Amino acid sequence: MALAKNPLTLLFIFLLLAVGSLFFGLLFGSVNIPTYKIAHILLFPANDATAQIVWQLRLPRVLASFACGGLLALAGTLLQVLLRNPLADPYILGVSGGAAVGALTAMLLGWGLVLTNLISLVGALIAIAVVFGLSFRTGNWNLYRLLLTGVVLSAGCTALITLLLTLAPANNVKGMLFWLMGDVSRAEEILPAWITLLIVAIVSMIFSRNLNVLSLGQMKAKTLGVAVLPLQVGIYFCASLVTVAALMLAGAIGFVGLIVPHAVRLLGVNDYRWLLPLSILLGGCFLTLADTLARTLWAPQQLPVGVLTALLGVPMLLLLLSKKR
């Protein structure tokens, strides 16, 4: 495509889309606030009820949605170059399964939000340690073993999740399902997610040239002087870190980490110096718009945002694939 020949133009367009998606999220809600008034509130903060709705309810939610989408897109991009597998997404290595088992166990026991997040974090860290420990032996890094271990662990966690849902009281099942399908409304502390996103994005950009070489294959990367093993280990832990940050923020939201990197590649961008920031911006836009629709389409009832990401993402990717030669 023509835009792919000038990725700076594409970056500018995506930045405009990011601003537009954030403003779109501020515009829609249970209370109708005119566009000009939202712009006035953002420029001149006040203490009236309308300003509190914008600053305390809508703005934190759209920022959480954007950060979560960016985290998932970044994780998917990193894992796809690590595994050289177009089907890789942030949850393929069992991190979400471990986090889900921990979170649902805490919910089943009736523990509060803080303990639920803590146990979910512990479950995710255990999954990361198990997958890494079984795939990395005496300096030998086997990506096939890594992928197989992650898939097996995910299958085991899925069985445990089904068991927990079966044992859970009826009044707890809905909350559990919302966690499994993603729920941005429960996001509280968004600053750690943004800090994680910025740090990992900067680190990834620093090594973007090495990622370009690694995408050609391990043997070619070694021939060209890239320290492949440290780079792969770094990619694994960076992808795991941003996945955990997204899980702690909004639960397991599927499809974003899979579709967004592919959508950017289908626009003709394959250089990781541009692919990484464009994926982060598009992932943030996509999840922000999906969450806005999730809380307004069936208002006052809120839909799980993970359902919207799949319903919106599948036709978008199929359309892009049908137009690509």
Image: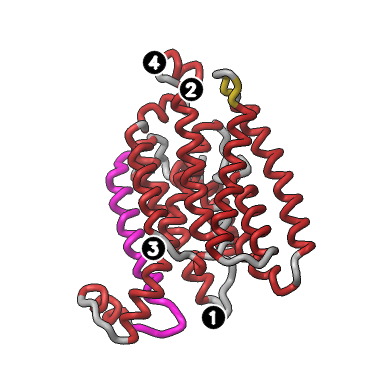
Identity of the amino acid at label 3?
Leu
Residue 299 tag number: 1
Q: Position of residue 90 (x, y in %)?
A: 55, 45
Q: Position of residue 295 (x, y in %)?
A: 51, 74
Q: Which of marks 3 and 4 precedes in the sequence?
A: 3
Q: Nearer the viewer, residue 128 or 178?
A: 128
Secondary structure state at the residue bearing disc 3 = helix
Q: Nearer the viewer, residue 260 or 150?
A: 150
Left or right of 253, for residue 105: right
Instruction: Tell me, yes or no, whether the two marked residues, 3 and 1, touch with CB atoms within 8 Å.
Output: no
Q: Which residues are magenta?
A: 5-33
Q: Which of marks 2 and 3 precedes in the sequence?
A: 3
Q: Is residue 49 above or below residue 176?
A: below
Instruction: Tell me, yes or no, whether the two marked residues, 3 and 2, touch with CB atoms within 8 Å.
Output: no
- Residue 35 among those drawn in magenta: no
Residue sitting at x 37%, y 54%? 194
Q: Which residue has dot 3 on it?
A: 63
Instruction: Tell me, yes or no, whether the two marked residues, 4 and 2, touch with CB atoms within 8 Å.
Output: no
Q: Which residue has dot 2 on it?
A: 229
Instruction: Tell me, yes or no, whether the two marked residues, 2 and 1, touch with CB atoms within 8 Å.
Output: no
Residue sitting at x 76%, y 50%? 159
Q: Which of marks 1 and 3 precedes in the sequence?
A: 3
Where on the picture, by quarter, is residue 202?
top left
Q: Which residue has dot 4 on it?
A: 225
Secondary structure state at the residue bearing disc 4 = loop
Identity of the amino acid at label 2?
Leu
